[in-house]
Image (cartoon, helix red, strand yellow):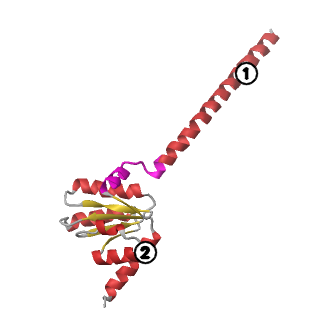
């Protein structure tokens, strides 16, 4: 019979896995406690939850929600990060930490029910954030409008100059 702690961890994992669209897997064996705590502080800003869980509990949780491909990602000491509105931001934090710490290895990710290897997570980290993309679209839409307003303003200025010249010529 599993202990109460393991049952509670399984229930929490099930809730997180059902509630979020993104789960990142990373192996952290050999990382110092201070470095690992630093990573957790960085992740707190961008994810719903970062957990270290026994591999058996992870397998059971994913099996219960109907995902069986998880077995290839579960090896060694595993850090799971759940959620976050923008998966590319989470991947940037994890990839940046992996560059600075050789023993930290990205294992992959589960995004919207599909599993992706480490290379995909690294390429995801190179994408701009949603805010940057929205800003570039808005800027792209704003530029033609700005040019149109500038042209109209120039026409009004020109008309004003012509009318001013006509009024001066009529006075003389």
Magenta span of residues: 118-132
Real-space CA distance between mark 1 and mark 2, rounded to the nearest whole angstrom: 70 Å
Q: Secondary structure at mark 2?
A: loop
Q: Is residue 54 visible?
A: no
Q: Which mark is residue 159?
A: 1
Q: Is residue 154 above or below residue 46?
A: above
Identify the residue at horizontal 51%, vertical 48% (top origin).
Answer: 134
Find residue 148 and report its image quarter: top right
Q: Residues within 10 Å of mark 2 (few under 14, many from 20)?
A: few
Q: Secondary structure at mark 1?
A: helix
Q: Is residue 106 visible?
A: yes
Residue 110, percent from left and from top: 38, 63
- Helix, strand or loop for the magenta stretch, by majority: helix
Residue 79, percent from left and from top: 29, 68
Which numbered disc flags the more N-terminal residue, 1 or 2?
2
Q: Is residue 47 above or below residue 11?
A: above
Residue placed furthest toward the left:
30
How many numbered callouts? 2
Residue identifier under label 2: 65
């Amino acid at each position: 019979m599993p202990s109460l702690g393991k049952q509670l961890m399984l229930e929490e994992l099930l809730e997180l896995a059902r509630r979020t669209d993104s789960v990142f897997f990373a192996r952290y064996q050999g990382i110092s406690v201070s470095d690992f705590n630093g990573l957790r502080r960085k992740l707190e800003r961008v994810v719903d939850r970062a957990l270290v869980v026994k591999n058996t509990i992870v397998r059971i949780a994913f099996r219960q929600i109907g995902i069986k491909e998880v077995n290839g990602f579960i090896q060694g000491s595993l850090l799971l990060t759940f959620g976050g509105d923008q998966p590319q931001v989470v991947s940037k934090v994890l990839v940046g930490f992996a560059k600075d710490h050789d023993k930290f290895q990205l294992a992959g990710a589960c995004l919207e029910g599909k599993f992706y290897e480490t290379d995909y997570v690294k390429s995801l980290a190179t994408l701009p954030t949603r805010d940057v993309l929205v800003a570039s679209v808005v800027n792209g839409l704003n530029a033609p409008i700005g040019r149109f307003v500038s042209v109209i303003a120039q026409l009004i200025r020109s008309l004003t100059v012509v009318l001013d010249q006509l009024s001066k010529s009529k006075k003389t």
